[in-house]
Image (cartoon, rainbow, N blue to C red):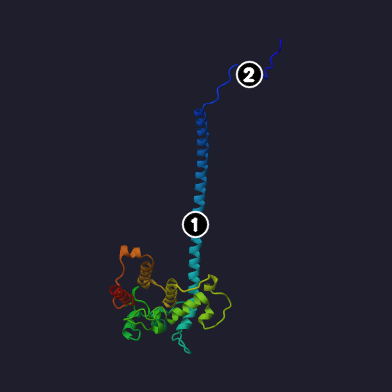
């Protein structure tokens, strides 16, 4: 009698293979489990990435803000002694003298700096107007620009664009900040590269001119004290009007005097629009 080989034996009835439906459910279950796991991992990775990105963005923003602050401080520190030289008459002296590393005695308190800061719609040679500017009876508004903005310290009420931002101090200030301090003194060589060369600047922009004009104005203005709180407020108002136009649309702004340069520019623009 032959012995059966159990290894070669087959069950009398083989189990039925899984149906297509069963296989589909199994595959779907595995896919869902894998997808849920991948999605959870992706969400965790995304949250970590988003958190890291926000932290990096904040770090970069902080560094940019710090750079702006340091740059402005350096510009102001360098301009202050240079401006004193620029407002000093050729082959002359300032009476009383101005200290180069402080703002004491500047502003309307000194004839040299007051002459440059005088608003375009006032006459510094008028003793009464000069007195009122010095004692604070007249506080220029943000729309009353200083005469040093203009070439040869002359503004034309009929054509307010004539000579605007071509003044000697503006030109000197731009050279000092963006080219080199020596170029502002008329020298043709410099010991180091200026900001324009370092940053690859190839042209002048309106924003740069506005920055230079404000830095020069700050350099020849008097030191801030409690009596000048209104002037500080008006300066911030000027910047809000320049940068945040929506802010002024919502809260309004100081009325621009009709004798100011800004009013003249607006009237000229209105005439141009009417003629087109």
Q: Cα distance, mark 2 to mark 1?
A: 70 Å
**Quarter assignment of residue 126:** bottom left
Q: Residue furthest bottom?
A: 91
Which of the labelled discs sits on residue 57, or is there none? 1
* Mark 2 vs mark 1: in front: 2
Q: Which residue is mark 2?
A: 10
Given contact means CB atoms under 8 Å apart, are the residues at marks 2 and 1 in contact?
Answer: no
Quadrant including the N terminus: top right
Please state if 51 lies on the left or on the right of 265 as rendered.
right
Please state if 138 lies on the left or on the right of 8 as rendered.
left
Q: Is disc 1 placed on a helix, strand or loop? A: helix
Quadrant including the C terminus: bottom left
Count how many numbered circles sit on residues in the image. Answer: 2
Q: Is disc 2 placed on a helix, strand or loop? A: loop
The spot of residue 231 in percent (x, y) is 36, 72
The spot of residue 191 in percent (x, y) is 58, 78
Which of pointers 2 and 1 lies earlier in the amino acid sequence? 2
Please state if 107 lies on the left or on the right of 5 as rendered.
left
């Amino acid at each position: 009698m032959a012995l059966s080989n159990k290894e070669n034996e087959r069950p009398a009835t083989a189990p039925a293979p899984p149906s297509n439906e069963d296989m589909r459910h199994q595959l779907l279950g595995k896919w869902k489990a894998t997808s849920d796991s991948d999605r959870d991992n992706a969400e965790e990775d995304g949250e970590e990435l988003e958190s890291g990105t926000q932290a990096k963005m904040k770090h970069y923003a902080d560094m940019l803000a710090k750079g702006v602050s340091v740059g402005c401080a350096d510009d102001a520190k360098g301009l202050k002694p240079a401006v004193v030289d620029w407002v000093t008459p050729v082959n002359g002296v300032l009476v009383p003298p101005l200290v180069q590393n402080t703002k004491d005695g500047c502003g309307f308190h000194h004839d040299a700096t007051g002459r440059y800061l005088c608003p375009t719609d006032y006459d510094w040679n008028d003793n009464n107007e000069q007195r009122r500017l010095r004692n604070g009876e007249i506080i220029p508004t943000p729309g009353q620009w200083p005469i040093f903005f203009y070439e040869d310290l002359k503004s034309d009420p009929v054509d307010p664009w004539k000579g605007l931002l071509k003044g000697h101090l503006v030109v000197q200030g731009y050279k000092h900040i963006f080219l080199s301090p020596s170029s502002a003194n008329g020298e043709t060589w410099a010991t180091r590269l200026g900001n324009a060369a370092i940053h690859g600047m190839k042209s002048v922009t309106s924003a740069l001119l506005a920055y230079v004009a404000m830095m020069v104005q700050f350099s020849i203005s008097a030191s801030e004290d409690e009596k000048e709180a209104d002037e500080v407020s008006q300066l911030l108002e000027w910047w809000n009007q320049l940068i945040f136009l929506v802010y002024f649309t919502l809260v309004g702004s100081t009325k621009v005097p009709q004798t100011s340069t800004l009013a003249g520019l607006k009237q000229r623009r209105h005439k141009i629009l009417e003629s087109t």
